[in-house]
Amino acid sequence: MATTLPETYDRMVADGRLTADPAQRATLAGLEARRLWLESGLHRRRGLLPGFLRKPPAGPKGLYLWGGVGRGKSMLMDLFAVAVAIEARRRVHFHAFMQEIHAGMHAARARGVSDALAPVADRLAGALRLLCLDEMQITDITDAMVVGRLFERLLAAGVMVVTTSNRPPEDLYRDGLNRASFLPFIALIRDRLEVRELETPTDWRRHKLAGARVYFTPAGPGARAAMDALWDELTAGAAAAPLVLAVQGRRVELPAVAAGVVRARFWDLCGRPLGPADYLALAGAARVVMIDDIPRLSAANYNEARRFVTLVDVLYEARTRLVASAADIPERLYIEGEGSFEFARTASRLIEMQGAGWGG
């Protein structure tokens, strides 16, 4: 007999990989019922005549799981997505998923298709029985205008949708342009998905970092090993994938994102002509940012140093947790050349951000 999701969770607690949380475990009961339904094949059962589908028996709704950052939503969804023993399943970050949708629509328009969304949605519906979307957050009007029709077609085709978010459905796209046309999507979520708040009082991501070392120097094999270990702990083994953020018509690629944690090298974030808007999008995509290999800064890399100052300012204002490896301690990262005097504030912020109580 297959191991149930609660049994898997209990084993991870016993092994020390997780800390027991009653709210997390209670959520797994509903996910286990969905797993059994999907594996039963009832939703795909055919009628007596070949090629004719009869209406499948009513099954469980999808799930919209929301709650504060670090509560374990992504971890629970990942346990579920891995455990469901069907081929027609997919787990993807919401931003990356919407980028694929827009790319597909662009290709459809290039072929002269009048309703560009229809073939994209129908292709997904034909390939999937389960779609798991991590960290739904709608701030872009192009996403807002598409997502309602997309979900409607997927749900009508019998695709089960499980998604996580940091906010309840009513707070999605709040104060966005033409929000009135977005409201039917909120009603669709309430009608077709179970909306459940993960009401655990503990921010487990912050809990894991409380008292932990988060700034490693000097950069090198030892620092990388420590960063790797912290990454594994924070992401609970979730698969990392690149994420492309659309910012004012530009594409900003983050090389590794998993369970709400972003990891990148200094040169990925500061070696390119990025600015405050790009770093704000980064802060919105994750609550923990890990930066590898921050070099010593000087007049020789002045532009990169200025971008790093901007990046730290944005992460500081957003109360984002920062984990980093660097060539030296903050006070000695930038000690000569233009801008070194102003860097004192950045160094002070880097030190403050190492505190056990830091973070939103």
Image: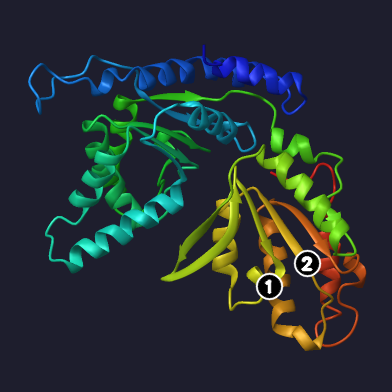
Q: In this picture, is 82 found above or below 55?
A: below
Amino acid type at circle 1 is Trp
Q: In this picture, is 168 found above or below 55?
A: below
Residue at image point 19% right, 68% down: 110
**Color style of the picture:** rainbow
Q: Secondary structure at mark 2?
A: strand
Q: Nearer the viewer, residue 126 or 290?
A: 126
Q: Nearer the viewer, residue 336 or 255?
A: 255
**Few, some or many residues within 10 Å of mark 2 (<14, 14–19, 20+):** many
Which of the numbered marks, if any, corresponds to residue 336? Answer: none
Q: Could you tell whether 213 is left or right of 136 in the image?
A: right
Picture coordinates of residue 289, whole percent (x, y) = 68, 54
| Quarter assignment of residue 329 | bottom right
Residue 353 in view (yes/no)? no
**Few, some or many residues within 10 Å of mark 1 (<14, 14–19, 20+):** some
Ranked by sequence position, the earlier of labels 1 and 2 is 1
Residue 313 in view (yes/no)? yes
Q: Could you tell whether 86 is left or right of 211 in the image?
A: left
Picture coordinates of residue 34, whole percent (x, y) = 41, 20
Q: Which residue is mark 1?
A: 267
Q: Could you tell whether 253 is left or right of 153 in the image?
A: right
Q: Secondary structure at mark 1?
A: helix
Q: Which residue is mark 2?
A: 293
Residue at image point 10% right, 16% down: 48
Picture coordinates of residue 198, whole percent (x, y) = 56, 25
Picture coordinates of residue 166, whole percent (x, y) = 53, 38
| Quarter assignment of residue 6 | top right
CB of mark 1 within 8 Å of CB of mark 2? yes
Residue at image point 60% right, 40% down: 238
Distance CA(mark 1)–CA(mark 2) = 8 Å
Which quarter shows the C terminus?
top right
